Image (cartoon, rainbow, N blue to C red):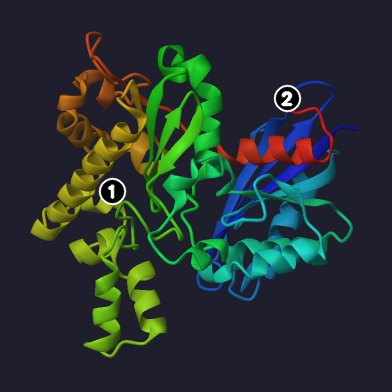
Amino acid sequence: MADAVLVINAGSSSVKFSVYRVEGAAPPAETARGLLDGIGVRPHLAARDLESGASEDRPLTASEAGDHRGAIAIVAEWLRDHLGGAKPIAVGHRVVHGGTAYAQPVLLDPSVLAALEALVPLAPLHQPHNLAAIRAISDKLPGLPQVACFDTAFHRGHPQVADLFALPWELYEAGVRRYGFHGLSYEHIAQVLPAVAPEIAGGRVVVAHLGAGSSMCALRAGRSAESTMGFTALDGLPMGTRTGALDPGVVLYLLQARGMTATEISSLLYTRSGLLGLSGVSSDMRDLLASDAPRARLAIDYFVYRIVREVGALASVLGGLDGLVFTAGIGERAAPIRAGVCEGLGWLGITLDAAANAAHGPRITAPGSRASAWVIPTDEERMIARHTLEVLGGIAR
């Protein structure tokens, strides 16, 4: 009987899951995937067995998946029917924030869980739901090993100067520093670059992870040198509903002059800003690209403008640019966004191939382009499966 690793990526109202079969010395192979979204409101399950082709796509009742515990129970039921005899040996979780304590994936136990709970204020949109899924698995499958894989870990090799704020030193020692996020995505891109784009894999590369959450990472020889995100996942690029970089004086103004509470400001910065706040139309780039509303166009222009600006900053950290990689939902699918960014980076030697960009790459720059641009799908779940096996002393490679 083959072994299987379950991968869970829990969001505020969704549980994304994958199953990886482990047999002998072969790399883990994905055999099933699914998404249960709309938890507590309009839950819906979409899942597919990649080996048999069997799929399920059905609405659920709020009583069936009213919280993450109920959602995990539904997922477990589906998996029982579709694991094909494979034995689950562990569960790997995406956990957004590892703080200063965790620079590598770690086997979960009560003390680790308590330490991760203390980091909730640093990632309030993500950490509580990551931990809720862990607890739900513990309730449903007690004794099954669980491994936390951190979005912050890939950035832990930064030079210290890159992670500082100009604040009193005791705050740095207390953990107020720049962490960076989306590390599992960047780690995957760094690992596949030698095969997909060998000419830039060992060089100076900026990776743009563009989606509902967006950030960029400067890679030097496959290692993170700098990131646009900092202490929390609010910093850097504008996102679907998050502000991106913001003068901290704005927060003081909202507190002092507008009389807003900390809770109200948190809601504003995390859930009512970004593309949604600017456009007044939607947080979804697909909706904005299809809209003729002037503010939808303005939100798109601002998104592109900030990406171009940040690529310039990251290229200065690297001392130049050999390649630019687009990944994640917007990066992989929104050709107009990639075109706008590449056109704004002509000064860095990027010459867009419009036909290749329309076809979504993988290479989207002309043969004579001094720096190349690429579209490379990310796969955070595969990274989590590999890390989980490594923690268990497995054979991932």
Eyeballing the image, is 36 above or below 330? below
Q: In the visual, does 252 lie left or right of 185?
A: left
Viewer-closest of 23 and 308: 308
Say above or below: 206 vs 307.
above
Identify the residue at the far front of this view.
169
Q: Amino acid at mark 1?
A: Arg
Residue 310: where, in percent of width, then height? 27, 42
Element type at mark 2: loop
Q: Quadrant of the C terminus?
A: top right
Q: Would you name the residue on which mark 1 appears?
A: 286
Residue at image position (24%, 36%) is: 312
- Disc 2: CA contacts within 10 A as few (<14), some (14-19) or many (>=20): some
In three-dimensional space, the C-alpha distance between marks 2 and 1, rounded to whole angstroms, equals: 35 Å
The one of 148 and 92 positioned closer to us in this rendering: 148
For disc 1, the neighbor class at 10 Å (few under 14, some 14 to 19, many from 20) is few
Residue beneath disc 2: 27
Task: Examine the image and state in which quarter residue 381 appears.
Answer: top right
Whole-percent x, y for residue 243 in the image = 30, 62
Residue 285 image point, x, y percent? 28, 50
Question: Residue at coordinates 13% horizontally, 54% vertically from top-left?
Answer: 298
